[in-house]
């Protein structure tokens, strides 16, 4: 499978694809840097998944760039043998946008955390998403500030006791998927760090998508928020009762025997959970991730409870719409072709004045 097959940007007509003799492995994408995360951190699982699927994309390492902000997750670029940049707090989307617009031969990734992306970086994230820049965002959500030693984050639950909220957090937490869907994200998904199979499938689809792909990854911080997602991360019967996997074109069902499902609510404006035996097979909502109207994806994003009673995972939305970088390059080409790119005329245009004594 080549970059062209996946609809990814290629290098100057050469396709940027290694030959059979140069076939790459996970080892080729592994840097010589010692991985320094706390033992048990969920970042290890995500790193392993990324290293595992990158060779399958058929992209040369020199055509791949990882940009991060500030936080534990933002060490990611050091551990991959690709190009990378450890940028400033919350500003990874701006750096990545510049790369994606000016270098169509690159496959650009943003690696960020719930604090980095949704607090100081919140403004940058929503504008990246609404512009639909051609890159992939991996948001590691552990519901805590780990690098700065355990303060509450924009996704921490109400009442969360931390070093910065000793009497419990008063803030209403963000729902990251609802946030980006409200900004018209063209690809939205969620996965668990502990589910290697689903995580890899979601990441593959995200990279294949042309436009901004947003993937939220629930992951454990064993030091400052240990066990936050254990009820869904560790598997077993309890997890099956809580996890609601989405599969495009299939009825949405879950449970030990798929005995529960998702149906339209009585008012017709939302969704609810119901026993399949009570409502019948025909009442179940069939998931359509390709709907141009984001209302279904948004309704599904609202069904995940903060206490993890239910957690919807998989691909919520994947639609085609124009990308910002394609549009920007087209404008530059048009200006060059029509010779309208006159900097002097722009600087001395109708909105300038000469002040005389």
Image: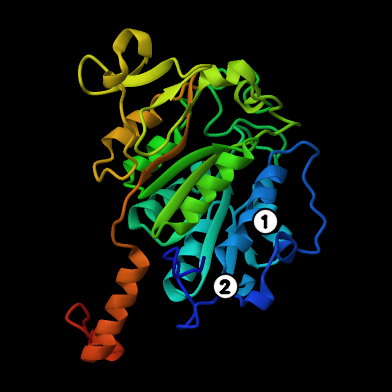
Whether 184 is drawn above or below 235: the answer is below
Mark 1 or 2, which is nearer the eye? 1
8 sits left or right of 287 in the view? right
Determine the residue positioned at 70% across, 66% down.
Answer: 81
Tell me if mark 1 has few (under 14), some (14-19) or many (20+) residues whose alpha carbon lies within 10 angstroms of its own. many
Tell me if mark 2 has few (under 14), some (14-19) or many (20+) residues whose alpha carbon lies within 10 angstroms of its own. some
User: Whole-percent x and y of residue 150?
Assistant: 69, 32
Determine the residue positioned at 46% across, 46% down.
Answer: 122
User: Whole-percent x and y of residue 262?
Assistant: 35, 21
Residue 63: which disc?
2
Give the mark nearer the N terminus: 1 vs 2: 1
323 sits left or right of 5 in the view? left
57 sits left or right of 220 in the view? left
Whether residue 291 can be seen here: yes
Whether 236 is drawn above or below 7: the answer is above
**Depth order, front residue of 51/307:** 51
SS at badge 2:
helix
From this viewpoint, which residue is outermost toward the left?
Answer: 350
Inter-mark Cα distance, 1 to 2: 15 Å
Whether 122 is drawn above or below 252: the answer is below
Q: Which residue is mark 1?
A: 51
Determine the residue positioned at 37% across, 30% down.
Answer: 300
Residue 225: which disc?
none
User: Whole-percent x and y of residue 78?
Assistant: 72, 60
SS at badge 1:
helix
The colouring scheme, among rainbow, by chain, secondary structure or one colour, is rainbow
Whether residue 167 can be seen here: no
User: Whole-percent x and y of residue 192?
Assistant: 59, 35
169 sits left or right of 6 in the view? right
């Amino acid at each position: 499978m080549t970059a062209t097959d996946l609809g990814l940007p290629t290098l100057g007509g050469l396709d940027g694809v290694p030959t059979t003799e140069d076939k790459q492995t996970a080892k080729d994408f592994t840097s010589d840097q010692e991985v320094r995360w706390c033992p048990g951190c969920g970042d290890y699982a995500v790193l392993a998944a990324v290293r595992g699927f990158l060779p399958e994309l058929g992209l040369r390492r020199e055509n791949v760039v990882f940009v991060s902000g500030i936080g534990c997750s933002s060490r990611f670029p050091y551990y991959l043998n690709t190009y990378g940049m450890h940028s400033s707090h919350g500003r990874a989307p701006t750096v990545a946008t510049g790369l994606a617009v000016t270098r169509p031969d690159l496959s650009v990734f943003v690696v960020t955390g719930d604090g980095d992306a949704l607090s100081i970086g919140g403004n940058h994230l929503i504008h990246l998403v609404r512009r639909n820049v051609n890159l992939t965002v991996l948001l590691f959500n552990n519901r805590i500030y780990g690098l700065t030693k355990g303060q509450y984050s924009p996704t921490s639950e109400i009442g969360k006791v931390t070093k910065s909220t000793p009497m419990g957090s008063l803030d209403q937490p963000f729902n990251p998927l609802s946030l980006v869907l409200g900004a018209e994200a063209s690809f939205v998904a969620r996965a668990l760090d502990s589910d290697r199979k689903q995580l890899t499938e979601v990441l593959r689809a995200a990279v294949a998508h042309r436009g901004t792909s947003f993937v939220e990854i629930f992951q454990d911080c064993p030091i400052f928020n240990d066990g936050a997602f254990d009820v869904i991360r560790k598997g077993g019967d309890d997890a099956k009762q809580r996890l609601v996997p989405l599969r495009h074109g299939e009825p949405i069902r879950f449970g030990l025997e798929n005995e529960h499902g998702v149906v339209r609510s009585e008012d017709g404006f939302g969704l609810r959970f119901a026993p399949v035996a009570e409502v019948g097979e025909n009442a179940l909502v069939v998931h359509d991730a390709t709907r141009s109207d984001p209302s279904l994806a948004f309704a599904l994003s609202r069904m995940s409870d903060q206490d993890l009673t239910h957690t919807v995972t998989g691909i919520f939305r994947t639609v085609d719409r124009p990308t910002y970088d394609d549009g920007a390059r087209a404008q530059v080409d048009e200006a060059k072709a029509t010779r309208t790119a006159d900097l002097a005329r722009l600087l001395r245009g109708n909105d300038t004045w000469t002040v005389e004594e």
